[in-house]
Amino acid sequence: MQEVSLIRSRFLTRALAVLAVTAALSTGVFAGSASACQCYPGEQEPQRYARAHVVFTGLLLTKVADAGSPNTPGDDLYRYTFQVGTEYKGDVPATVEVVTTQYATNCGLTYLAVGVDYLVFATTWRDVYQTRTCDGTRLASGGPPVTGAVSAGATAAAAPCTAA
């Protein structure tokens, strides 16, 4: 009888260990990485186009880090200067500066490279053009912006909306 009790005890201990490991692994898989940047789930390019104040193609001429105010943490910016090609929405000057935060976790569009053509989706606030990860800025080589309805199976080419 004591042998059966020992076998049951070992079985229960192993079963609980397997459940604990499974729970830990599931949490890691389903929780994902922590990020303050949240995009609209399922949003596609037509919605991003509608939300943008200006949409244009532009060759990225410069990328300058601006440290912002020493008394205001998190206001560090990248200032991108674009030579505008085709305007799809709104009116922008031939050369335009667009700002974004330097932090991907705050939805900053940090990966743009000088010398590359982009399709830029931006909003304006106080005469400053701004863009974020979720706004849809992408390589111009993906074609003009998608402005109409997109079928359920199709996805618009857009910037990834995950933060590192």
Image (cartoon, helix red, strand yellow):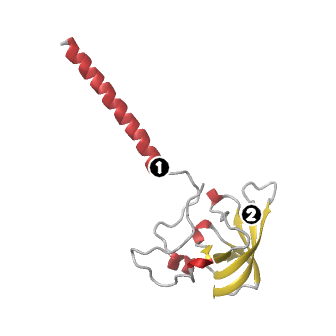
Q: Position of residue 162 (x, y in %)?
A: 56, 59
Q: Position of residue 110 (x, y in %)?
A: 67, 63
Residue identified by numbered label 2: 77
Disc 1 to disc 2: CB gap under 8 Å: no
Tell me which residue sits at (61%, 66%) in the image: 133
Q: Earlier in the sequence, mark 1 or mark 2?
A: 1
User: Left or right: 45 with respect to 70?
Assistant: left
Placement of the N terminus among the 4 image quadrants? top left
What whole-number distance in Å separates the C-alpha atoms at marks 1 and 2?
29 Å
Quarter-of-image position of residue 12: top left
Residue type at the position of mark 2: Leu
Residue type at the position of mark 1: Ala
Residue identified by numbered label 1: 31
Tell me which residue sits at (23%, 17%) in the image: 5
Question: Does residue 20 sit above or below 106 in this rendering?
Answer: above
Q: Position of residue 159 (x, y in %)?
A: 57, 68
Placement of the C terminus among the 4 image quadrants? bottom right
Quarter-of-image position of residue 105: bottom right
Q: Position of residue 84 (x, y in %)?
A: 72, 83
Residue 11 visible in rendering: yes
Disc 2 is placed on an element classified as: strand
User: Left or right: 86 with respect to 144?
Assistant: right
Question: Does residue 73 sit above or below 134 in this rendering?
Answer: above
Residue 90 visible in rendering: no
Disc 1 is placed on an element classified as: helix
Tell me which residue sits at (52%, 84%) in the image: 147
Viewer-proximal residue, 71 or 41?
A: 41
Residue count near mark 1 (Cα–Cα under 10 Å), binned few <14, some 14–19, many ≥20? few
Residue that sits furthest to the right in the current view:
70
